Image (tube, rainbow, N blue to C red):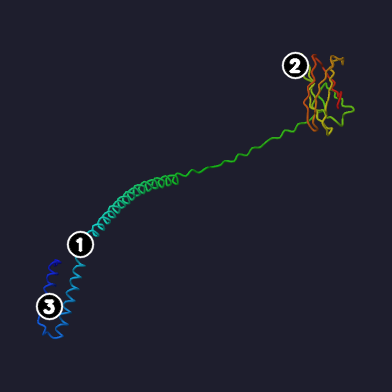
Amino acid sequence: MVPASAVTAITLAELSRASSRPHTQTAGRRRRVTGRIFLSVTLVASVASALFLGFTRPADLSSRVIALEGQLVSARADLFATAGRAATLDIQGAQLNEQVSKLMHQLKALRAAKVHTVVKTKTVTETQTVTRWVPSGEGISVEVTGFADLIGIHDVQLTHSYGYTDVIGIATNKSGRTIAYAQLGCTFLDANGNVLANEITNKQNWAPGATWGFVCSGQTDAAAAILRVDEMS
């Protein structure tokens, strides 16, 4: 690079020589000298501008270098972070592949060991017992006079236990309504027909169609008994 002082010296020397030449120069020569002076001035301005730019450019370049270095550091940090995430994903992918491999192995094992379920059907034949109702047992007399349409009495038996004689049986409400109160009476007889005792049994709120398993007991050893309907309301 040519120093600015040298360029200035050259230009001044050129101007001095031009002014010291004889006035007998032709008009054409004057024009050439004038052109050279103008060119020299232009050259000095260009060189000065270049020098000014040369002095100011390093600061700009330094700022740009600092900015680029900052961008480079940031890019390197991003690159390292991306590499770390990629490594983590690789590890997770390897673990998932291992799990899938184990599951496939278990699935193959299950398919190979299929269990066939055999269902056996057992036919069960049920025997239905038909109960045969009897109006009265041996030694029993049942009287339903006046109540035959309201009550049904069947399967009456005479039993003995612990010094008691019991008249047992089943009664059915045939009235079609709830009977608030029903009373049965029983008379116990000896072998000669003599009365030994009289007892009663009763039921309240007897629903229509419902059955009543009654027991009429007397503390006696009876050979026979008479069962009767005493009251229904």
Tell me: residue 212, above or below residue 99.
Answer: above
Percent from the top left, x then y, of residue 60? 25, 60
Task: Give SS at disc 1.
Answer: helix
Image mark for residue 55: 1
Residue at the spot of label 3: 19
View extreme (right): residue: 146
Pick the front one: 40 or 91: 40
- Marks 3 and 1, how far apart at CA: 34 Å
Q: Earlier in the sequence, mark 3 or mark 2?
A: 3
Q: Residue at x 21, y 64 (%)?
A: 52
Image mark for residue 161: 2
Left or right: where does residue 125 sit relative to residue 108? right
Q: Residues within 10 Å of mark 1 (few under 14, many from 20)?
A: few
Pick the front one: 83 or 54: 54
Q: Amino acid at mark 3?
A: Ser
Q: Is label 3 in contact with label 2 (beta carbons under 8 Å)?
A: no
Q: Amino acid at mark 2?
A: Ser
Tell me which corner region of the image, top left, top right, bottom left or bottom right, holds residue 207: top right
